[in-house]
Image: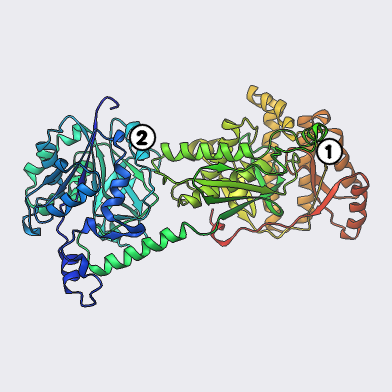
Amino acid sequence: MAGRSLVCVILVAGHAQQLKQDIEEDESGKYIHLKGVPKALLPAPQGKRILDHWWDAIKTRQLFSDVFLVTNADKYKHFERWATASDFPVENIINDGSTILDNALGSVADVELAIRTKNLWENDILVVAGDMLFQDSKFDMAQVLDYFYRTPEGDLAIYYEMGSLEPTFSRGIVEVCSKTNRITKFLEKPAPHETCSRNASVVFYAFRSETVSRLPVYLQEYRASTQRTFGAFMQWLINDLKVLVYGMKLPTGFQLIGQVGLKDYESWNSYFADQAKKECKAPRSHRAYARVGIMGNPSDGFFGKTISLSIANFWAEVTIKASAKLRLLPHPLNDPIDFGSLSDLYGISNKEGYLGGLRLLQATCKKFYHFCATRGIALTRQNFTLSYDTNIPRQVGLAGSSAIVTATLKCLMDFFNLSDHDMPKTLQPQFILDVEKEELRINAGLQDRVVQIYEGLVYMDFTRSLMESQGHGNYEHLDVDLPPLFLVYLPNPSDSGKIHSDVAARWERGDDKVLEGMKKFADLTEEAKTAIKNHDWSTLADLMNSNFEMRRELYGDAALGVDNLKMIEIGCSFGAAVKFPGSGGAVLGFLNDQSRMEELRHRYQQEGCVVVDIIPKKPVPKNNSI
């Protein structure tokens, strides 16, 4: 594929009969200057014509060996004038000879005409309809072609997710395999009951030369102009011939397709203009919250089961805004670059370490681009500035790093107009984990990322068979109606991540004690799930204590650390149920006798600990379905 040349063919030979008639009959005088103007040259947002937006996306000449434009005899002079003013080679305009809709050749025949007259049979061909209005003029054509090159054995069809008011019978609809991105079925203007898909295909295709050679075969068999549309051709190619065609989603909408009227033009031109204005709105921010492991941790990285709660006390917030260059802003506290003195640098580095949040932003951006490039999602070509803030205490096992990654992912999806259909919510935790493990070598499991995506009190089943069969666990929201919980943490803890290292190695070796321990964590989680549903807090307290004792047995006191064990011992001395909420540096508990809570708080504070009353972060309504 890389050795072949790629040619672009822009189609603007349509006869917009209804639009032409509406403009001629308009009595307001508002559109008198548009009489006779072809649809592709009608004004569009940003002070350009519809075709100008396409030409801006295409004219990076190193992407194509040549670009041709096919028009009709009726409007040829308009496009010839456009070409001279737009640095488009006039000799590359092809006239199909049609003057009215009744003698139109059809879009497939127009492409075949260009290929035949310019002898392009050995080339791969990109075909676009240059009279479609598309929402975002900044989509990256290079990314579309890069994905085409990634799939040399197949063709490529661009699609977008239809708006709620767009009927399926107005578009060609594609059904796309979520794992391979292969288009399994193409339906030309189906009724709603014929498909559940809302993915609309438009005339925006990349064909291998092998497929190009099929055009004469199709035209020989299908001679009516109504059969020579690309919708009909794609049905034949995909449904009948079973040719391999991949789908790539553009996070933008396409309109003014086919025969449309003046009201359609006014409506969609206004809509896209409004959307363009919204791009200049204030920066967008997203939060992800700290979490505490109620039960089962740390078995989430070992095909276990856990229950975890997101808490509103602590959060990470990432802000994204459009900018001329892509910039990642360091946090003044977490990514210091200015110091009062060498002594100041020493003190801050000794206390805070060297690993701030900036690396998390950069790694998430890198992984996000790679995900979209491999999953057939074309991102718009626009830059942004990312900044972050967080109040999650460092190194106390409250999932501070994953909170920053989660909030960054939310910002990127929002900025590039991606939805949970593009990156399913069940897969987002794995994406976040991959950022940390593969890009930054942070040892972690899925628990933190799941609860930060779904929020609330979440039961998670990571059983190996589930993970291998569906690529994610089973997750269930539980009622966030818990007894008063408290969190205790050390203001200057040691690195919590090292606690996992030895157990992970033993688990990999098949150590019987570790395997049995992880099974015990799962059993405790199932019992805790039942206790929570029954509001049986006495049983939950016993299970929390058992969870810690199992952890202590597996890891040993040396790994858990003197300070961590001291916090546990203080809680137990007051009769509180206590356990680690994460990988160390903090203790989670609840005291059934609330009359002693103030005394317990003072005892912890005497040891230099911070005591926080936990505020559960309930899921927003849209997150209730898992």
User: Given this view, does label 2 or label 1 mark the residue nearer the observer?
Assistant: 2
Q: How many marks?
A: 2
Given residues 288 and 565, the one toward you in this image is: 288
Few, some or many C-alpha atoms within 10 Å of disc 1 (few <14, some 14-19, many ≥20)? many
Instruction: Check disc 1 and report the residue beneath it.
Output: 564
Three-letter amino acid code at the position of disc 1: Asn
Indicate the position of residue 392 as horizontal and vertical percent values: 72, 47
Quarter containing the N terminus: top left
Considering every residue shown, the one lying at the far front of the view is 85
The image quarter containing residue 609 is top right
The residue at the point 87 percent across, 34 percent down is 562
Indicate the position of residue 183 as horizontal and vertical percent values: 30, 43
Image side of residue 173 versus residue 558, left or right? left
Image side of residue 568 versus residue 302, left or right? right
Indicate the position of residue 282 as horizontal and vertical percent values: 54, 58
Few, some or many C-alpha atoms within 10 Å of disc 2 (few <14, some 14-19, many ≥20)? some
Q: CA distance from mark 2 to mark 1?
A: 51 Å
Given residues 88 and 96, the one toward you in this image is: 88
Q: Is residue 119 above or below residue 75?
A: above
Residue 52 visible in the snapshot:
yes
The residue at the point 73 percent across, 43 percent down is 333
Image side of residue 54 versus residue 609, left or right? left
Considering every residue shown, the one lying at the far top of the view is 509
Instruction: Check disc 2 and report the residue beneath it.
Output: 146
The image quarter containing residue 259 is bottom left
Given residues 80 and 462, the one toward you in this image is: 80
Q: Earlier in the sequence, mark 2 or mark 1?
A: 2
Image side of residue 48 versus residue 561, left or right? left
Three-letter amino acid code at the position of disc 2: Asp
Residue 304 visible in the snapshot:
no
